[in-house]
Amino acid sequence: MSNEIIVTKTLVGQADDLAVAHEHFTAHYVVGGRFALYGLLGQMLDLVNKFEAAIDREDLMANVKYRLRSEFGIKTQKNTSDIAALIRYITRADRKTAHVYTRVLESAKQCGISPEQLPAFIEGAGGVERIRALSSNQSKASNENGTDECATLTEEYLGYREVLPLASFDATEFLDQVTSGDTKYAYFICIRKPDGKFYVLAPIPATREFERSAIDRLSSVICEDMEQAKEGVLNLQRAANTASIDEFSDVVFLETATHSHQI
């Protein structure tokens, strides 16, 4: 029995050692490596901005695409964006990585994110793969449904929601002071606590680029099924016209195979 106890303690001790090793690996390689990548992407965004601001931008990009083709055997298409070409030049032959990085930088630029803000932006969005996935879904919805039609339908939805809001709260003096006058809507970071309520943590000082991105993202959700979306917005319009809040304030009209969107 004593030998068995010794063996058991030894194995547990090995598990403890591995736990320490894993913690060290996570801190130094996984977390550290992740933030090192975010910093590198910030440098790439800074370079992209410099290319876009350059007087000889067209000549610079022509040189980049020529070198991609002549030195690395990488051809670009006519519709390849300057960001995509530049990131491909930096990452060279790794096409998938270049695609992911390009999506991240394009999303950041749409939101008006600076190179210094990029690491926090990526971390807050759930990482580079999460941004790529959201961006791809948004592009897919736009291509399938038509960007203009989606934007129009989304604006209609928001207009009717002004009459029939999902919720409301009184603004404090602090929130009034930081609300931006450059955007139509106000944006807040909220958290849902165990009591089921949402709590406002901070306002987001939004830009017009940020608002466009937010509405585009909402459009991709609303327009996931255009026929169903049109019917839902029509129902919301009727409710807004009659101010039938009790009947329609929690209307649900968008459903996917895995979940429903209450909007």
Image: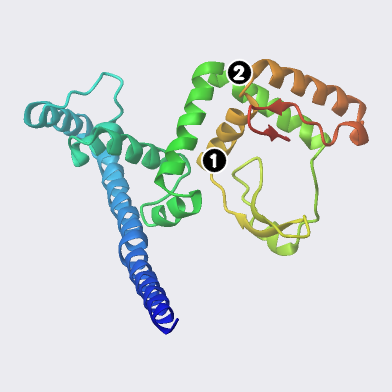
Res. 150 mark: none
Residue 8: horizontal and vertical position, in percent? 42, 75
Which residue lies at the image location 67% right of the left edge and 28% below the top edge?
A: 155
- Residue 204 left/right relative to 80: right
Name the residue that disc number 1 marks.
208
Residue 55 appears in the rendering:
no
142 versus 26 height, above or below: above
Residue 13 appears in which quarter of the rendering? bottom left
Query: Viewer-proximal residue, 63 or 59?
Result: 63
Residue at 72% across, 59% down: 193
Q: Nearer the viewer, residue 93 or 66?
A: 93
Q: CA distance from mark 2 to mark 1?
A: 20 Å
Helix, strand or loop under label 2: helix
The residue sitting at 70% across, 58% down in the picture is 200
Which of the labelled discs sits on residue 149, or is there none?
2
Q: Residues within 10 Å of mark 2 (few under 14, many from 20)?
A: some
Marked residue nearer the N-terminal end (2 or 1): 2
Residue 175, horizontal then vertical, whole percent:
69, 59
Question: Residue 114: x, y in percent?
Answer: 40, 51
Visible in this render: residue 151? yes
User: Do the numbered discs 2 and 1 sit on residues whose CB atoms are within 8 Å?
Assistant: no
Q: Is 147 left or right of 6, judged from the image as shown? A: right
Q: In the rendered image, which quarter contains the N terminus?
A: bottom left
User: Disc 2 residue type?
Assistant: Glu
Q: Residue furthest front?
A: 1
Which residue appears at 69% of the width and 63% of the height?
174
